[in-house]
Image (spheres, grey):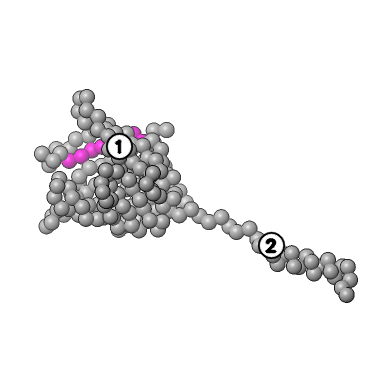
Amino acid sequence: MLSRPLLFVAALVAAASCVRAPARLAQPAQRDQLYSQLIGSWQGTLEYKDYQDSTRRVTLPTRLKVLPAPDRDGLELQFTYDDGPGTTVQSTSHWHFDRALEDAEWGSARDSALQAFTVTAREGGQRGTPIRLVLEGQGADDDRPARIRETLEVSAGAVRLTKETQFEGASFAFRHAYTLRRAE
């Protein structure tokens, strides 16, 4: 039979073997950090290349509201811009990245299928540094098949989203750019 002090020590050892040290909190995935940086209200400009005159660029005041997407894990982007006197245009897009920020889907909320993109370059995003993602995928522009490149740059309080298109036999060319600052 064990003595009381020995029984007490045995009980402490048994209890200690059942208790683990608290786990360190895992860093949130970069995708989740990106999403949290983007959610909110933004304002700035949309600059785009005119379809009728490719040498002409138009700049419009623009607002963007970013919310969690209702369809699945991702973001809903609600764009509003003034397109001339008395004309306000609104569009809604959905954006979904995989957890590793390697693949994405993006498109209008009205589209039957979202466009697939591959993240071809990724910079920053560690310890609060600005993040820059370059996404490429097959799509269409001006009703013509094209390779699409979207470059997303997010820093504290600012977002820039640039779209370039590449038609067969040509190099990438500017299509449009949103330059926005946090409005909240």
Residue 77 in the figure: left or right of residue 9: left
Name the element at disc 2: loop
**For residue 168, what is the image quadrant?**
bottom left
- Does residue 45 belong to the magenta stretch? yes
Outermost residue on the front side: it is 112
Residue 17 visible in the displayed image:
yes
Residue 181 visible in the displayed image:
no
Outermost residue on the top side: it is 86
Give the x, y percent position of residue 65.
36, 37
Amino acid type for the residue under numbered disc 1: Phe
Instruction: Name the N-terminal-most of marks 2 and 1.
Output: 2
Name the element at disc 1: strand
- Above or below 90: residue 76: below
Residue 175 in the figure: left or right of residue 101: left
Structural distance between the alpha carbons of marks 2 and 1: 52 Å
Give the x, y percent position of residue 138.
21, 55
- Does residue 63 belong to the magenta stretch? no
Quarter of the image for the C terminus: give it.
Answer: top left
- For residue 162, the mark is none
Q: Which residues are magenta?
A: 42-49
Outermost residue on the bottom side: it is 1
Residue under the image location 20 percent in, 25 percent down: 85
Q: Nearer the viewer, residue 39 or 113?
A: 113
Residue 85 in the figure: left or right of residue 103: left
Give the x, y percent position of residue 110.
26, 43
Q: Nearer the viewer, residue 160 or 3?
A: 3
Residue under the image location 63 percent in, 58 percent down: 22
* Majority secondary structure of magenta residues: strand
- Above or below 23: residue 34: above
Q: For mark 1, what is the residue?
A: 79
Q: For mark 2, what is the residue?
A: 19
Residue under the image location 20 percent in, 28 percent down: 84
